[in-house]
Image (cartoon, rainbow, N blue to C red):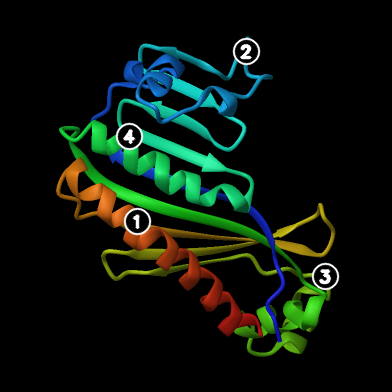
Amino acid sequence: MVFKFEFRSSSIVVVGQLNPSIFSEFWMLQTGILKENEIDPDSNGRKDVFTMGDISQLATKKYSIQVLRNRFLISTGEEKYCEQLVRVTSRIFALLSHTPVSAIGFNFDCIIKLDKNDYGSKYNSLFIGDAQKLDSIVGRNWRVNAILINEEENPKMQLSFSHLDNPKDSMLIGANFHYSEINGAISLKKMIKDRYTIDQRKFMSTLEEMLL
């Protein structure tokens, strides 16, 4: 049986000491990280696209970037552009190799329909030993949201499960893989290329084991 899900988003977060003013559209074009045909034509004049002082935000057709003094975030809402996150982040920190970096995180979100392949009952059985007893205590219309944290380091893995009202009878499932032992920006490129895809696959295989 194939695990069925809807991709929601993915992001890479880098924690360190950053200069947001560097991350302008002009710099991205000059360095070849961004190409002219990748610029979102609807971003011109938008209030959420700017570079000033302590924050820089950039939107392209494939991904968006937000940079604060202590955090770099790149994200996409389309699965086909996940490889762009890896390429762009690796390229940026290869150029900014002297940037002090202390941690990195890979995030993945998907939506499942709880009525598909009986995902809902399998999910509830993971957290509720006796569902009928709970029915008698709180009524039948209960829902279980959960956060699971693996306390192991590098990565520390966190899974979150949240019921959604729209779309109906669905659940948002998110994963965060956090790495805290980073030896500066130079080591980021290899880690991003090595770990992003591995962690993405681990997220999906974990859900399959839990829900199939």
CA gap, disc 3 and disc 2: 47 Å
Q: Position of residue 119 (x, y in %)?
A: 73, 78
Counting residues from the N terminus, which is met first, the one under dot 1 or under dot 4? 4
Please state which of the two labelled residues, at mark 4 or mark 3, is closer to the viewer.
4
Q: Secondary structure at mark 4?
A: helix
Q: Is residue 178 above or below residue 60?
A: below
Q: Tell me the residue at 27%/27% (across/down).
A: 18
Q: Amino acid at mark 1?
A: Lys
CA gap, disc 1 and disc 2: 32 Å
Q: Position of residue 181 (x, y in %)?
A: 19, 55
Q: Position of residue 107 (x, y in %)?
A: 48, 54
Q: Secondary structure at mark 1?
A: helix
Q: Tell me the residue at 48%/64% (across/down).
A: 200
Counting residues from the N terminus, which is met first, the one under dot 2 or under dot 4? 2
Q: Secondary structure at mark 2?
A: loop
CA gap, disc 4 and disc 3: 49 Å
Please state which of the two labelled residues, at mark 3 or mark 2, is closer to the viewer.
2
Please state which of the two labelled residues, at mark 3 or mark 1, is closer to the viewer.
1
CA gap, disc 3 and disc 1: 44 Å
Q: Secondary structure at mark 3?
A: loop
Q: Residues within 10 Å of mark 4 (few under 14, many from 20)?
A: some
User: Residue 141: which disc?
Assistant: 3
Q: Which residue lies under the disc numbered 4?
A: 92
Q: Residues within 10 Å of mark 2 (few under 14, many from 20)?
A: few
Counting residues from the N terminus, which is met first, the one under dot 4 or under dot 3? 4
Q: Amino acid at mark 2?
A: Asn
Query: Which sits in the foreground, 168 or 185?
Result: 185
User: Residue 193: which disc?
Assistant: 1
